[in-house]
Image: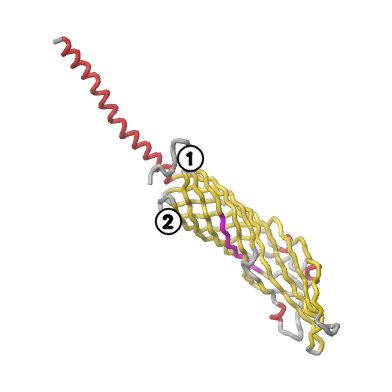
Amino acid sequence: MKRLYLLTFCLLICLPGYSQAKRKKPASFSTQGKQKDTFLEKQWWLGFKGGINFSGVVVDKSYAVIAPTNYTSSQTKKKYDNYSTVGSQATVEITFTFKGFSFSLQPTYRHSSFVYTTASAWYEDDVPMLELNYDQEQQIDYAEMPLLVKYDITNTKLRPYVQVGAYYAILLNANKAISVSGVDYASGGENKFTEPDIIVGAEYLFAKYNWGLMAGAGVNYHVGNIRVNLDLVYRKGMSLVNSTENRYSNDRLTGTGDVMDDIKMNNFSVSLGCLFPLRFLTSGFTSLDRP
């Protein structure tokens, strides 16, 4: 009988502890699920990306040094070969994500270029005497401060997104290269020639600041805690990139018959990079523990 009392007493002590242990398991799972929700819905990201870009210009107003008298001025206008040269960019991305929306600050170094050609000719009694052709390339370096808003289209491992925003650009450096070629008819034949390239620093020919709008799309692919990112952006310039005050300031350039038009610059860029989360960086937790 004493043994029965002792066994009953032991059961009464153990049962509440066993019941409490069973109740703790759901709470543990709930906490883990909440942590995953917080990681996926609210997160700071820091990343780096780089890529290539192509630039084109929109002319607001044309300018020229030479005013023809015996042929139309359209023959002396610049012919822009837009999006034909390759530039590059490098970006640091700081992004805050909340429930599919992201607010992203992306300081960028951007090297861009665009080209155009001009031509001039001299006639005597409607007979051509000299033809000159100028191929001109502008290379420009900017420090940009873009601010973008993104929206994730899906909530999967592969997440496409769309984005819009604006940027403010500060001129760092600019160079201009001119290739000169032509045909001399004065000697009675067609003597083709080329001159040594003219390369000058052209920072003063461009505005120190400009701004524009941005729109694009991209995709993030999750690899554990890390996002691999492919980003496409189109920049539309909203202000002039050339300096209106220094248009005629370089005698060497005006001597070749060249001055800058009033232009705005558009740009299309492709970048590849990766983003690292700044919260929950632990070896025991990944952002894709659940589908």
Q: Amino acid at mark 1?
A: Arg
Q: Amino acid at mark 2?
A: Ile
Dot 1: element: loop
Q: Quadrant of the N terminus?
A: top left
Task: Find residue 187 and report its horizontal and vertical position in percent.
Answer: 86, 83
* In the rendered image, the vertical position of residue 159 relative to residue 113, given as above or below: above
Residue at image position (62%, 67%) is 83
Q: Residue furthest top?
A: 2
Q: Please tell me how crowded label 2 is: few (under 14), some (14-19), or many (20+) other residues with Cα within 10 Å.
A: few
Where residue 279 is drawn, which disc sits there?
Answer: 1
As drawn, is 137 to the left or to the right of 39?
right
Query: Which of the 4 image quarters holds residue 61?
Result: bottom right
As drawn, is 227 to the left or to the right of 145?
left
Magenta range: 263-271
User: Residue 105 magenta-drawn?
Assistant: no
Dot 2: element: loop
Residue at image position (70%, 64%) is 138
